[in-house]
Image (spheres, grey):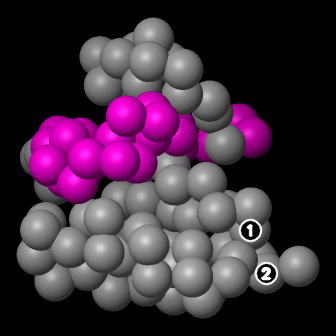
Amino acid sequence: MAVSDADIAFAMDLLSELGPITSRKMFGGICLYYDGTVFSLVSKDGTIYLKCKGSLATELVDDGGTQFHNMPYWSLPDAALEDSVMACDLGRRALAVLLG
């Protein structure tokens, strides 16, 4: 079972204020890219994860986030799924670490 087109559209729309985001299907889910850098993934069940570490990962866990397998991806909190400003803020913070 692969991630649905509706879940892809939702994730792209939720994070659209970050700027030009592209996606690529991989392993039943998708990876989201910002300027060629993978910063997020959407699993086949539609869960949106951010690639992060340190204090942002801790914050996501404290807000109920779960880790994607043993990878450095943590799910967005439920509140961010209903608030694109919050989701994009978290996305910007993840990108700041990734892009250095």
Note whether 43 is above or below 66 in the view shown: below
Question: In the image, residue 72 lies at what x, y percent?
Answer: 53, 39
Q: Does residue 54 appear anywhere in the picture?
A: no
Mark toward the start of the polypeptide (2 vs 1) = 2
SS under mark 1: loop
Q: Is residue 19 above or below residue 72?
A: below
Asked if the residue at tag 1 contacts the one at tag 2, i.e. Cβ–Cβ closer than 8 Å, the answer is yes
The amino acid type of the residue labelled 1 equals Lys
Q: Inspect this view and state whether residue 40 appears.
A: yes
Left/right placement of residue 83 relative to residue 74 reads left
User: Percent from the top left, x then y, of residue 66?
Assistant: 62, 30
Question: In screen coordinates, is 87 left or right of 99?
Answer: right
CA gap, disc 2 and disc 1: 5 Å
Label of residue 73 in the image: none
Q: Residue 2: which numbered mark, if any?
A: 2
Residue corresponding to mark 1: 44
Residues in magenta?
69-94
Choose top left, top right, bottom left or bottom right for residue 20. Answer: bottom left
Left or right of 61, for residue 13: left
Query: Which residue is at the front of the view, 61 or 73?
Result: 61
Mark 1 surroundings: few (<14), some (14-19) or many (≥20) residues within 10 A = some
Q: Residue at x 50, y 49 (%)?
A: 49
Which residue type carries mark 2? Ala
Q: Residue at point 52% right, 62% down?
A: 41
Instruction: Give how far across and how far down residue 1 sits, in percent.
Output: 88, 79
**Nearer the observer, 11 or 23:** 11
Q: Is residue 100 magenta?
A: no
Structural crowding at the residue carrying mark 2, measured as other residues with C-alpha within 10 Å and reported as few (<14), some (14–19) or many (≥20): some
